[in-house]
Amino acid sequence: MKGGQPPPVQGRTVAGPAAPAPDDAPTLRAAGFEPDPVIEAYKRDIDRTLLRQNLRRSVTERVANLMALQRLAAEARRATRP
């Protein structure tokens, strides 16, 4: 993003208010694009802190986390079987 990073947003609960999305409209307009109102509405409800945290990790760490998630999913499936 131009102009530096937006301030970090603290984690929020599912029922909590949506974190305000940074206004990317000036950047898009400068590049010759108009922002899509539907996409802008969805972006308001996305907590980007988890995305940023994951992107700070190395590829190896991300793959290890994905493997752990797959093991958890397999265990959950196994636990629900009779």
Image (cartoon, helix red, strand yellow):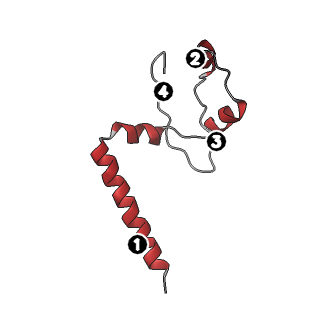
Q: Which label was assigned to residue 17?
A: 3
Q: Residue at x 49, y 79 (%)?
A: 80
Mark 2: amino acid: Thr
Q: Are marks 3 and 1 in contact (CB under 8 Å)?
A: no
Give the side of residue 65 with respect to residue 30, left or right: left
**Mark 2–mark 1 distance (CA, rounded to whole Å):** 45 Å
Mark 4: amino acid: Pro
**Mark 4–mark 1 distance (CA, rounded to whole Å):** 38 Å
**Mark 4–mark 2 distance (CA, rounded to whole Å):** 18 Å
Q: Residue at x 35, y 37 (%)?
A: 56
Q: Percent position (x, y) of residue 55?
A: 38, 38
The residue under label 1 is: 75
Q: Which label was assigned to residue 27?
A: 2
Chain-order first, disc 4 or disc 2 = 4
How crowded pointer 3 is (Cα within 10 Å; few <14, some 14-19, many 20+) is rated as: few
How crowded pointer 1 is (Cα within 10 Å; few <14, some 14-19, many 20+) is rated as: few
The residue under label 4 is: 7
